[in-house]
Image (cartoon, helix red, strand yellow):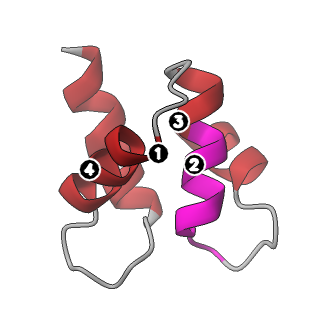
Amino acid sequence: MVTELFDVFDVNNDGVISRSEFMALAKSLLYEQDLEFSSDIFKQFDENHDNVISKDELIAMVIELAL
């Protein structure tokens, strides 16, 4: 499921979810319109602070949010 999710939101197919792609993901999955909230989640799950979300970071996010 996460692979499909990643593929849908990695619009430019560069292998990572950029901040703008993440905002679209947060809006779709979390019904979250608040940019500050989405930005906070992005920062929390961008574990290596490279300003993108990798597939592994997305998996960790989905697991944590599901619990």
- In the structure shown, which secondary structural element does the residue marked by tag 4 occupy? helix
Residue segment shown in magenta: 15-25
- In this view, the mark in front (1 or 3): 1
User: Amino acid type of disc 3?
Assistant: Ala
Around disc 4, counting alpha carbons within 10 Å, would you say few (fewer than 14), some (14 to 19), or many (20 or more)?
few
- In the structure shown, which secondary structural element does the residue marked by tag 1 occupy? helix
Q: Which residue position is annotated with label 1?
A: 35
Left or right of 2? Residue 39 is: left
Q: Which residue position is annotated with label 2?
A: 23
Q: Are marks 2 and 1 in contact (CB under 8 Å)?
A: yes
**Residue 61 percent location from the top left of the image:** 30, 40
What is the spatial separation of the Cα atoms under label 1 and label 4, in whole angstroms? 9 Å
Q: Are marks 2 and 3 in contact (CB under 8 Å)?
A: yes
User: Amino acid type of disc 2?
Assistant: Met
User: Amino acid type of disc 4?
Assistant: Asp
Q: Are marks 2 and 4 in contact (CB under 8 Å)?
A: no
Label located before the other in sequence (1 or 4): 1
- In the structure shown, which secondary structural element does the residue marked by tag 2 occupy? helix
Q: Which residue position is annotated with label 4?
A: 40
What is the spatial separation of the Cα atoms under label 3 and label 4, in whole angstroms? 11 Å
Around disc 3, counting alpha carbons within 10 Å, would you say few (fewer than 14), some (14 to 19), or many (20 or more)?
many
- In the structure shown, which secondary structural element does the residue marked by tag 3 occupy? helix
Is residue 18 a member of the stretch shown in magenta?
Answer: yes
Quadrant in which the N terminus appears: top right
